[in-house]
Image: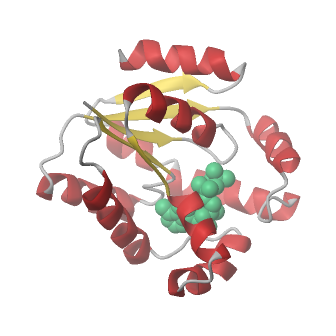
Amino acid sequence: MHHIIIFGPPGVGKGTQSLLIAEKYNLFHLSTGEYLRKAIDEETELGKKAKNIVEKGGLVPDDIMTGIVIQALKENIGGKDGFILDGFPRTLDQAKALDKIFGEMKIGGTEILYLKADEEELVSRLLKRGRKDDTEEIIRKRLRIYIETTEPIIEYYGSTGQVIEIHGVGAVEEIFGSICEKLG
Ligand code: ADP
C-alpha cells in the first residue's frame, strides 16, 4: 500500500512521473491541475469559478480544492493499492486539511516525494510545453507562488521525517528508476 504526495515546482515532471508510479503500483492518481482543466473545458460550475484563476496562474481557494480531494479519494481508492496526489496540497492550510482527511479516513504512512530542479530549467521546460497558462509572465508568477506559498510546506512535512528528495533533471526513465528505488 502506498499513500504518496508528489511535490515540487511547476514543470519538474510531477505529472509524467505520477502516471508511471500510478501504473506500476496500482494507485489512484489525482492531478488537481488536470481535474480543474477538465472542469474548465466542460464549463461546469467549478470550471466557471476556476477558469480565470487558473489561466492567470493564481490559486483556486483552499475550501474548493479540499472538497475536490476528499470526494475524489472517497470515490476512487477502493480496489486500488493506495493513491498518488499531484498538485495538492499547495498551501499550508491545504496540508493541514489533508492531515485531517487522512485522520478521518484512517490513512497513515504518507510518503512525500519531493522533486527538484533549478528555476531556469523549469521555465524553459514550461515554455516548450505551451499550455494556456504557460506564457513566460504566468510561469514566473506560478513559480513565485510556489516558492512563497507551496515550498514552505516541505518544512511542515520534514518535521515528521517522511520526505524523499529526488533530483528531477535527467531522462524520465532514470528519474522514475530512482523514485522506485526509494519507494521500495
Ligand atoms: P503545474 O504542474 O504547472 O504546477 P498544475 O497542473 O498542477 O500545474 O496546476 C495548474 C493550475 O491549477 C495551478 O496554477 C492553479 O491555478 C490550479 N491548481 C491546481 N492545484 C491546485 C491547488 N491544490 N490549489 C489551488 N490551485 C490549484
Residue 152 left/right relative to 171: left
Residue depicted at 53% across the width and 63% down the height: 35
Across and down, in percent, residue 127 comes to 86, 49
Residue depicted at 29% across the width and 40% down the height: 80
Ligand 1 is found in the corner quadrant, namely bottom right
Q: Nearer the viewer, residue 20 or 103?
A: 20
128 shown above or below 67: above
Of all residues, the one furthest to the front in this rendering is 79
Residue depicted at 68% across the width and 59% down the height: 142
Residue depicted at 62% across the width and 83% down the height: 43
125 shown above or below 103: above
43 shown above or below 154: below
Across and down, in percent, residue 79 comes to 25, 42
Residue 172 visible within the image: yes
Across and down, in percent, residue 39 comes to 57, 74
Q: Quadrant of the C terminus?
A: top left
Residue 141 left/right relative to 152: right
Residue 21 left/right relative to 38: left
Q: Quadrant of residue 122?
A: top right
Across and down, in percent, residue 162 comes to 31, 30
